[in-house]
Amino acid sequence: MRICLINILLLFIFLPAVYSQPSAPDPHYRFIAGPSLLQDRNFYLFTLMERLPGLSAPLEKDSALQHILVNCQERIAHPVSKETPAEALLFSDDAIRDVTSALLRLSRQYPEQMAPLFREMRASGLFQLYAGKGDHELLEAAWKDAANGINYIINGYTTGKGQRYPTIDSAAFYVEARAYKNAVQRLAGKAGEKNTLFFQPSLRLALGLLTLNRREEAIRYEPLSALNAAAWKQIKKTDWSKYMYPAMVILGASPKATERISEIGKNRCRMGAELYRKGQVPFIIVSGGHVRPVFTTFSEGVEMKKYLVEELKIPASAVLVDPYARHTTTNLRNAVRLAWRSGMPVDKRMLCVSDAMHLVYVNSPVFAQRCNTELGYVPVADIQQTDLYFLSFMPDLRSLQANAMDPLDP
């Protein structure tokens, strides 16, 4: 008995260093601001590493991480063989593995300095896909996501290859043009200057490439609480017990040419407006970003709200806009995010409105497979279709997970 008690005591002594109980995301979480909003939206892990007090010092002192930084800067200044400066800033498989080992080692050596990082990560919701993992697994998964996201941007906007959606996510310039290559080289050279943390040169190049190509869609409408101010305010006064559904999502549809809103989008808005007037829901979420034609100045969601309010006379305080989503997968994901962040109950079913064939797709194994492939999860659960033009679903809070492989709508 005495041996068993000693073993149990030892287990409790060492358990916190190995595993911390997952905490729920905080709907009132206040995000820490980094050097740029584009960085915060795409690579919040790096913002936390730079901004949390006492955390950057262990990262700067670690010999393995410093070796990666110095090697990267030397390769920018003196490229290996035919390697371009941009290629020197990619994270190799070896570098990703070495950084993983270093971060896990630092987590054990500096538990007090690392503890705030884990708290912020969990509370933010941006790493929700890994919420059930221990702290070390959480950090490893988040770091690998960030490294792969950096590589995705650098490859996509220097070679034009490897993008999931090469048409609508494409570079603004011909990537093989001499002028563009020179611009990228200047960006890489500048990215290699005045860095103290191992990820900063690669991060600076990736963000620079997005800016160079006018691919800053991810921050055009921030904060969404301001864009949706009237509805945000109304949500706080809503008696949810009066409604079966807290909100409906109207899925966007891209115009065929240069019109502000497509006829399909208008039709979906009319169907949604009819349900709203019948008292089915207190709020409408319109979802759609800058999709087609490529580099369009119009957001589907923004134009759908204008149509609902100006033409269909729906109160502006009843309409929330997701101006980012470019696919059905992220239409639903972003709607769940908006519901959560704005204070709607997410333990109730939500409606989804679209045309009949679109909803057949949403309620199919094909859609679920695409979600799992591109997001790593399905953002909604228990889909039930009771009408030709709308279905209902339960929100999944894994939708809060930031997607580093989709820098225009992470």
Image (cartoon, rainbow, N blue to C red):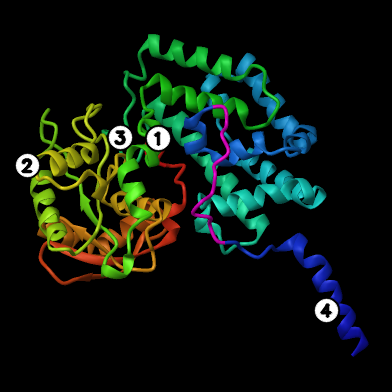
Task: From the image, tell me which residue sits under label 4.
Answer: 8
Q: Residues within 10 Å of mark 2 (few under 14, many from 20)?
A: some
Dividing the picture into quadrants, the one containing residue 247 is bottom left
From the viewer's perspective, is 381 left or right of 57?
left
Which residue extends farthest bottom?
Answer: 1
Tell me the distance, in whole angstroms, between the alpha carbons under discs 1 and 2: 28 Å
Tell me the quarter of the image containing the C terminus. top left
From the viewer's perspective, is 161 left or right of 315?
right
The location of residue 154, given as percent across then percent down, is 47, 29
Task: Give SS at disc 1.
Answer: loop
From the viewer's perspective, is 351 left or right of 162?
left
Task: From the image, tell me which residue sits under label 2.
Answer: 263
The numbered mark at residue 222 is 1
The location of residue 272, given as percent across then percent down, is 14, 55
Q: Vertically, is 157 above or below 365?
A: above
Marks 1, 4: nearer the viewer? 1
Tell me the quarter of the image containing the N terminus. bottom right
* Predominant SS along the magenta part: loop
Q: Residues within 10 Å of mark 1 (few under 14, many from 20)?
A: few
